[in-house]
Amino acid sequence: MNALFADSRRMSSLTNLMFVLVGGLFAIVGAGMGIGEYSFGQQATAATGSVVEVRRTEGADGTNLIPVIEFDSPNQQHVRFEGIATSPPYVVGTSVPVLYRTSNPSDARIDQFVQRWLFPSIFTPIGLVCLSIGAIAYVRQRFTRV
C-alpha cells in the first residue's frame, strides 16, 4: 500500500512539473511574441493598405481565408503582403491600417488587434495560469507531510 502511495505521489509530482514546464514555455513564447510586436510597433511607419485578394488554403483545420494586402510606401515602393486568416474573412477592396518597417517595407502587418496581438494575448495568460497551477500544486505537495 505504501509503494502504491509513493508511485501516485511521484506521478502527481511529475504532472505538476509538466504543468510548470509547459506553462513556462507558453508564457515565454507569448511574452516573446508580445515584446517583438511591441518593438515592431515602436519602429514601424503607418500607412493605409487595401485588401486585393483573399487567398484560400486548405489545412488540417479546414479552409483558411488569408487576406493579401497592398500599399505604397512614401518612396513609391509597391508592397504586397499576407495577413493572418480571420473569421469573418476580409473583403476585397476593404481599406486596412498597415504598419511596416521603413527599412524593410515588406515586413508589414495589418494594424489590428487580431493581426498583431491575438497570439501573445492567448499564449501568455494560458502559460501563466498553467505555470501557477503547477507551481502551487508542486509546492503544496512538496511541503505537505503525509
Image (cartoon, rainbow, N blue to C red):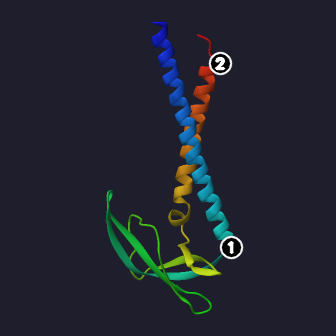
Find residue 13 and report its horizontal and vertical position in percent: 54, 25
Find residue 18 and report its horizontal and vertical position in percent: 52, 35
Name which residue type carries label 2.
Phe
Seen from this angle, which residue lies furthest right?
Answer: 42
Circle 2 — which element? helix
Q: Is residue 46 above or below residue 16?
A: below
On-image quarter of the N terminus: top left
Name which residue type carries label 1.
Gln
Q: Which residue is mark 1?
A: 43
Which residue is depicted at the point 62% across and 90% down?
Answer: 74
Q: Earlier in the sequence, mark 2 or mark 1?
A: 1
Circle 1 — which element? helix
On-image quarter of the C terminus: top right
Q: Is residue 132 above or below residue 93?
A: above
Q: Is residue 54 above or below residue 122?
A: below
Which residue is depicted at the point 54% across and 64% down?
Answer: 113
Seen from this angle, which residue lies furthest front?
Answer: 3
Which residue is depicted at the point 60% across and 36% down?
Answer: 132
Rendered image: mark on residue 143: 2
In whole angstroms, how far apart are the C-alphas of marks 2 and 1?
A: 48 Å
Depth check: 60 or 86 in front? 60
For residue 34, what is the image quadrant?
A: bottom right
Task: Sort mark 2 into few (<14), some (14-19) or many (20+) by Cα contacts within 10 Å.
Answer: few
